[in-house]
């Protein structure tokens, strides 16, 4: 696909995301020669900085880029850093839009950017609407001369109501087709591979339904705590931070029907349908038995003291924000009726891993009854990260007398594709937006459908006094009570198994 000449304006350019993700992704595109011929980055934020200070900060002296810059020629690095410029936007991102407009026009003329602009909103979310409005006020949303696109970082709202407000606030100034809501999980190769596994093979799809699938498990575990983001995290929690967006995106790809083609709207329409078919839980009894929340408490791992969540900087001492969430739910449609989904996400787990496990039903009539309980069912394990790949577990005969069955693996790992460079998520998504491809971006109705499902859980957790908050020691697989959720089904697959 062709990438047209363009300007990338980053709001929040002095922030962590710009240095940690955006600029390194742009650098990878530069090295891979995938940036357009004429391409300029204009950083903006509240800080006062010169162009050179900005270049030093995000490129030349950046600790995130350093490993990539070693052994490269000075000229080559400068070829990249010289395309970075900076303009400050005043204390509240409120003023100076006339100046910004002038700067954009000047850069456009000088560097031949053909009037094409991406505005990347990486500021605190309360600023998204005001910035969109200011851009609209000075006509910077005008597409008469070149296209204009907006990339918005999560969170997309705090609940359904605020998500709707945000969507309509943005849509007052930009058409939905101009708005790209980024969910970096969709940029992960293995998440996209869910679509290919399902719809480019004949062997899985015939089994991908209630007749053959017993239950579905999705685990997202991080070994880190909230790091330096306690202040933000304490207003968010696991359900808002990971489940509403990243995990429900993964769920939508597991649940969706085959799209009619690979056009962005073909795929996005099916994802919305999938999200709308999740059974919204409102009955307190159901919510009680289908949801579990927890918080990590201080512990010691290999002699190192680990802080509990409530002792982290920026976190309230009596915080009731969850760092662990496990949800059981059903999908009300023809394909999935009565198949339970178990989805969990947490910080301070024993390891960092994200995986999907499709548990198939046991054979209807098992003739090798004595072969061991756990050896009966097939599992398809889609490893999103790390060790990206796919694993199929199936029974084989143990050599020797009788019919003892043991599980064996058929596996594929991305790392064995030695010749292929797997793009990083942000890199892939940025390039897609530069080319006007919104397939891997969340549409407004997708975001709202996800909130529709999550809202009642949050309300129940926040309003009901007898909802327990289970503590779990940092470094274990969450509260023991989470096993109750999956009782009758078996046990959570803790991914080192
Ligand atoms: C972010 C969350 O969206 O995703 C973080 O805000 C989380 O809390 C991160 O750590 C996880 O992303 P990844 O790609 O490391 O799994």
Image (cartoon, rainbow, N blue to C red):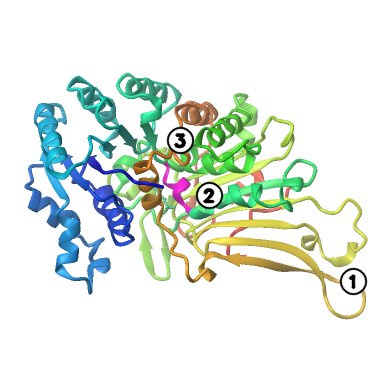
At a point 18% along the width and 46% down the height, the residue shown is 14
Q: Is residue 141 above or below residue 250?
A: above
Any part of residue 138 in sight: yes
- Residue pointed to by mark 2: 192
- The quarter of the picture where residue 235 lies is top left
- Residue pointed to by mark 1: 403
Residue 313 at what x, y percent from top left? 28, 48
- The quarter of the picture where residue 436 lies is top left
Residue 87 at what x, y percent from top left? 11, 40
Which residue range is magenta in the image?
183-188
Question: Within 8 Å of ligand 1, the CB of disc 3?
Answer: no
At a point 30% along the width and 32% down the height, the residue shown is 147
Viewer-side label of 1, 2: 2
In terms of depth relative to the viewer, which is nearer, 225 or 95? Answer: 95
Q: Is residue 440 left or right of residue 213?
A: left
Viewer-side label of 3, 1: 3
Q: Give the alpha-carbon distance from disc 1 to disc 2, as whole Å.
A: 39 Å
Residue 191 located within the stretch drawn in magenta: no
- Residue pointed to by mark 3: 442
In terms of depth relative to the viewer, which is nearer, 72 or 109? Answer: 109
Q: Give the alpha-carbon distance from disc 3 to disc 1, as whole Å.
A: 50 Å
Q: Is the C-beta separation of discs 1 and 2 under 8 Å?
A: no
Mark 3: secondary structure: loop
Indicate which disc residue 335 carries.
none
Question: Within 8 Å of ligand 1, the CB of disc 2?
Answer: no
Q: Bin the neighbour count of mark 3 within 10 Å (Cα to Cα): few under 14, some 14-19, many 20 and up.
A: many
């Amino acid at each position: 696909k062709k990438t047209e000449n363009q300007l990338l304006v980053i709001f929040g350019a002095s922030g962590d995301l710009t240095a940690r993700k955006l600029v390194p992704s742009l650098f990878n595109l530069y090295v891979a020669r995938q940036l357009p011929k004429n391409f300029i980055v204009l950083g903006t934020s509240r800080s006062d900085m010169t162009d050179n200070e900005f270049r030093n900060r995000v490129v030349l002296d950046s600790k995130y880029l350093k490993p990539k810059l070693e052994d490269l020629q000075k000229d080559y690095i400068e070829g990249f850093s010289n395309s970075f410029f900076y303009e400050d936007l005043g204390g509240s991102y409120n003023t100076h839009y006339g100046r910004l407009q002038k700067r954009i026009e000047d850069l456009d003329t000088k560097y031949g950017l053909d009037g094409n602009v991406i505005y990347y909103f990486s500021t605190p979310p309360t600023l998204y609407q005001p910035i969109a409005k200011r851009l609209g006020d000075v006509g910077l949303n005008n597409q008469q001369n070149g296209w204009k696109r907006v990339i918005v970082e999560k969170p997309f709202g705090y609940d359904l109501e605020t998500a709707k407000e945000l969507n309509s606030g943005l849509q007052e100034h930009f058409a939905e087709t101009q708005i790209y809501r980024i969910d970096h999980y969709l940029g992960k190769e293995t998440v996209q591979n869910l679509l290919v596994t399902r719809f480019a093979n004949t062997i899985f799809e015939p089994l991908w339904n209630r007749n053959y699938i017993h239950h579905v498990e999705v685990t997202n575990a991080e070994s880190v705590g909230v790091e330096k983001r306690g202040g933000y995290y304490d207003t968010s929690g696991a359900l808002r931070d990971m489940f509403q967006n990243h995990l429900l995106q993964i769920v939508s790809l597991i649940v969706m029907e085959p799209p009619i083609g690979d056009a962005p709207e073909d795929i996005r329409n099916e994802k919305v349908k999938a999200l709308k078919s999740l059974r919204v839980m409102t009955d307190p009894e159901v919510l009680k038995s289908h949801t579990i929340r927890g918080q990590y408490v201080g512990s010691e791992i290999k002699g190192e003291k680990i802080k509990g969540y409530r002792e982290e900087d920026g976190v309230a001492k009596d915080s009731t924000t969850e760092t662990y969430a496990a949800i059981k739910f059903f999908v009300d449609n023809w394909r999935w009726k009565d198949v339970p989904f178990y989805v969990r996400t947490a910080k301070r787990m024993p390891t960092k891993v994200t995986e999907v496990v499709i548990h198939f039903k046991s054979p209807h009539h098992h003739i090798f009854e004595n072969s061991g309980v756990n050896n009966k069912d097939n599992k398809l394990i889609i490893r999103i990260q790390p060790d990206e790949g796919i694993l199929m577990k199936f029974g084989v005969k143990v050599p020797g007398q009788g019919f003892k069955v043991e599980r064996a693996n058929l596996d594929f790992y991305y790392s064995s594709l030695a010749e292929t460079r797997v793009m990083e998520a942000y890199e892939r998504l940025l390039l897609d937006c530069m080319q006007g491809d919104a397939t891997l971006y969340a549409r407004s109705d997708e975001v709202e459908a996800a909130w529709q499902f999550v809202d009642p859980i949050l309300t129940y957790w926040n309003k009901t006094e007898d909802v327990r908050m289970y503590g779990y020691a940092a470094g274990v697989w969450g509260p023991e009570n989470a096993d109750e959720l999956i009782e009758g089904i078996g046990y959570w697959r803790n991914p080192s198994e």
